[in-house]
Image (spheres, rainbow, N blue to C red):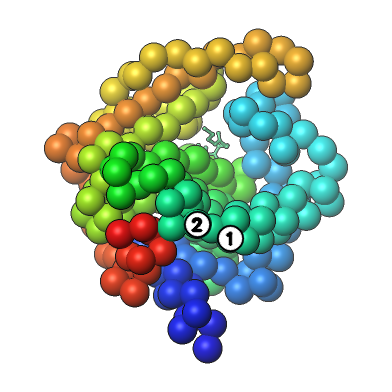
Amino acid sequence: MLIDHWPLVGLRLTTPDLELRWPTNEELAALADIAAEGIHDPAFMPFLFPWTDTTPAERARSVILHFWRTAGNWKPDDWAIPFVVFQGDEPIGIQAINAAQFAITREVSTGSWLGLRFHGQGFGTQMRAAVLTLAFEGLGAETACSGAMMGNAQSLGVSRKIGYHEDGLGRAVVSGKLRIEQRLRIDAKDFQSPCRVLVKGLDPCLKDFGL
Ligand SMILES: CC(C)(COP(=O)(O)OP(=O)(O)OC[C@H]1O[C@@H](n2cnc3c(N)ncnc32)[C@H](O)[C@@H]1OP(=O)(O)O)[C@@H](O)C(=O)NCCC(=O)NCCS
């Protein structure tokens, strides 16, 4: 069975409204449909790499290809999980968490998106809390970083609610234009999850996280 070779398919994070887990290919296709409907106001690009600035069909395909590519590039000392976020049976977005040389750095980074019609209902906060609980309580992370473009009130709102502090500004070129990124950080000692989070299926995966 797949889980015998790839235990990450059994890793599940549960919050009051959501489940974060590995998808089947058909669930990935359903998530691609959600991406095709739209992820953000096209007038405001929230991502450093502007992957959403294309046709709905290409945006959908890039969700699938990005997931497979990320899984295929897995290394215990350089990993990234693009958790698919489910509300019931419906995939609604991605909450990614990644790290390099985690056993030494004890630092993770996160990034996320939700289909437009799922914004503003507290889901972004729950899914970030879920991966931070995995990182701090499950994996023994000491610190977690994130970042948001100046003006991304929703993403900055999630970070504020969770208790991140500002960690400097970054300058990036996105589609030929200067964008300023607010960097954010939260340390293990300052993290208290805003909601209950259950982590299941972690033990068989520890080796794959380089632990
Ligand atoms: C970022 C994202 C995942 C957040 O998810 P979400 O479910 O919308 O977020 P939540 O509802 O949990 O929380 C958003 C918070 O920001 C606040 N917020 C939203 N717009 C705001 C504004 N204009 N000014 C101030 N606060 C604002 C909300 O009020 C909320 O805080 P509250 O619960 O205290 O009221 C989602 O909006 C998204 O997918 N955006 C597009 C992609 C993106 O920006 N990804 C992040 C790239 S770094």
Q: Observer-nearest residue: 40 or 66? A: 66
Label 2 packing within 10 angstroms: few (<14), some (14-19), many (20+): some
- Label 1 amino acid? Ala
Q: Secondary structure at mark 2?
A: loop
Given the current orientation, which residue lies at the most extreme left position? 189
Quadrant hosting residue 113: top right
Give x and y (percent) for residue 14: 35, 64
Give x and y (percent) for residue 48: 62, 28
- Label 2 amino acid? Lys
Give x and y (percent) for residue 209: 38, 58
**Residue at screen point 53% across, 54% down:** 82
Quadrant hosting residue 162: top left
**Residue at screen point 42% across, 22% down:** 183
Residue 54 relative to residue 195: left or right: right
- Whether 54 is drawn above or below 178: the answer is below
Q: Observer-nearest residue: 88 or 204? A: 204
Residue 71 image label: 1
- Whether 118 is drawn above or below 50: the answer is below
